[in-house]
Image (cartoon, rainbow, N blue to C red):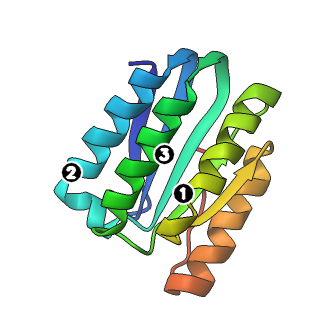
Amino acid sequence: MPVKSKIVDKNNGVIDTWSSLIIGKDILSRLKLLFSDKAFGEVKFWVIDFSAVTDFSISTEEILEVVRLDKDAHKVNSEIIIIVITEKDLRLEKSKMWEMLSFETCWEKMISNNKEQAYQFIKNRMKLKFNTTINNLLT
């Protein structure tokens, strides 16, 4: 699977950095793995970084499956902040489709094409929502 995941900020966050070609099956596998982890209920933010992806292939049906998985995961963690970082039009279009379809989760979401701006958003929201200070996510 073309994703590297790391736990950051004293287990408050997860950063998934994707690269190369991504297919819908990869995304679904990652979601099932993350959502089945007992620690998922405590995660406060999740960064999904697609900026290094070279090609992106996910069908509408797979996006609908992502939304279904999200709805189930929302029952475990309703407070998570999700940031999607993407720089290409197709990934942005698919990310916006996911954002629109997953409105029922009521998760706070941001889609950005600027990593520094996205990380600043996380820092600000973590302070306001959880009264938690994050130092540096870019390292």
Q: Is residue 88 visible?
A: no
Question: How far, Cα to Cα, is label 1 from label 3?
Answer: 20 Å
* CB contact under 8 Å: marks 1 and 2: no
Q: Is residue 116 visible?
A: yes
Mark 3 or mark 2: which comes first in sequence?
3
User: Which corner quadrant holds the N terminus?
Assistant: top left
Residue 25 percent location from the top left of the image: 39, 22
Q: Nearer the viewer's eye, disc 3 or disc 2?
A: 2
Judge left or right: residue 136 versus residue 6.
right
Mark 1 or mark 2: which comes first in sequence?
2
In this view, 56 is above or below 49: above
Residue 77 percent location from the top left of the image: 34, 69
In this view, 33 is above or below 8: above
Q: Residue furthest front?
A: 61
Q: Which residue is mark 3?
A: 15
Q: Residue shown at 48%/39% (left/top)?
A: 16
Secondary structure of the residue carrying tag 3 is strand
Instruction: Name the mark on residue 58.
Output: none
In this view, 10 is above or below 50: below
| Kind of residue at disc 2 | Asp
Judge left or right: residue 60 versus residue 41.
right
Judge left or right: residue 82 versus residue 96.
left
Mark 1 or mark 3: which comes first in sequence?
3
Question: How far, Cα to Cα, is label 1 from label 2?
Answer: 21 Å
| Kind of residue at disc 3 | Ile
Q: Which residue is mark 1?
A: 102
Q: Which residue is mark 2?
A: 37
Q: Where is residue 12, by image quadrant?
A: bottom left
Q: Residue shown at 39%/50% (left/top)?
A: 68
Q: Where is residue 32, by image quadrant?
A: top left
Residue 78 percent location from the top left of the image: 40, 73
